[in-house]
Image (cartoon, grey):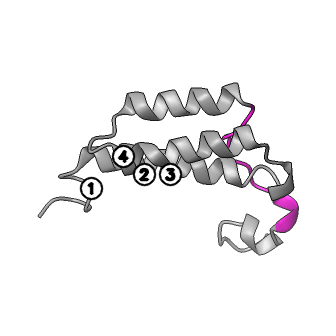
């Protein structure tokens, strides 16, 4: 049995990378801050997986560059102020 359900469908891995890119972009702005250009770019990214039978890394890379062109930040962010001290420790006892 292959490791993971995506093993026999490599194009799904590339599409899931696009979905992760979209999720990251959606977490960067409040809804009212999105322009129609941002939303159209995100819609076009989702369309890649909906319309194409195969999704390649080149599709992911093109979408990442298009997001950058319209000013969509896709770098992951962690708001450390929203985490408790327990979330920041690695489970070891304090000395």
Q: Is residue 79 magenta?
A: yes
Give the class, few, some or many, for how many residues have Cα within 10 Å of label 3's Cα (few <14, many ≥20). Answer: some
Nearest to the observer: residue 71 or residue 36:
36
Q: Is residue 81 above or below residue 84?
A: above
Q: Is residue 33 magenta?
A: no
User: What secondary structure is marked by label 2?
Assistant: helix
SS assignment for the magenta stretch, majority? loop
The stretch of residues the image draws in magenta is 71-82
Lower sequence index among marks 3 and 1: 1
Say if mark 4 contacts mark 2, CB within 8 Å. no
In the figure, is residue 42 to the left or right of 53? right
User: What secondary structure is marked by label 4?
Assistant: helix
Residue 14 position within the rendered picture, expressed as x and y whole percent measured from the top left = 38, 43
Q: Quadrant of the C terminus?
A: bottom right
In the figure, is residue 70 to the left or right of 20? right
Query: Which mark is drawn over residue 19?
Result: 3
* Residue bearing mark 2: 16
Residue 86 position within the rendered picture, expressed as x and y whole percent measured from the top left = 76, 74
Give the class, few, some or many, for how many residues have Cα within 10 Å of label 2's Cα (few <14, many ≥20). Answer: some
Nearest to the observer: residue 75 or residue 72:
72
Residue 5 position within the rendered picture, expressed as x and y whole percent measured from the top left = 25, 62
In the figure, is residue 27 to the left or right of 62? right
Say if mark 3 contacts mark 2, CB within 8 Å. yes
Query: Which mark is drawn over residue 6?
Result: 1
Q: CA distance from mark 4 to mark 2?
A: 15 Å
Say if mark 4 contacts mark 1, CB within 8 Å. no
Q: CA distance from mark 4 to mark 3?
A: 14 Å
* Residue bearing mark 4: 51
Q: Which residue is located at x 58 percent, y 26 percent?
A: 65
Lower sequence index among marks 4 and 2: 2
Q: Is residue 43 above or below residue 2?
A: above
Q: Which residue is located at x 60 percent, y 45 percent?
A: 42
């Amino acid at each position: 049995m292959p490791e993971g359900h995506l093993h026999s469908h490599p194009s799904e891995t590339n599409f899931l990378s696009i979905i992760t890119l979209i999720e990251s972009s959606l977490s960067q702005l409040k809804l009212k801050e999105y322009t129609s250009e941002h939303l159209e770019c995100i819609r076009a990214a989702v369309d890649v997986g909906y319309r194409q039978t195969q999704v390649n890394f080149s599709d992911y890379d093109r979408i990442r560059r298009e997001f950058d062109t319209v000013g969509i930040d896709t770098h992951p962010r962690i708001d450390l102020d929203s985490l408790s001290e327990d979330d920041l420790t690695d489970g070891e006892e304090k000395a």
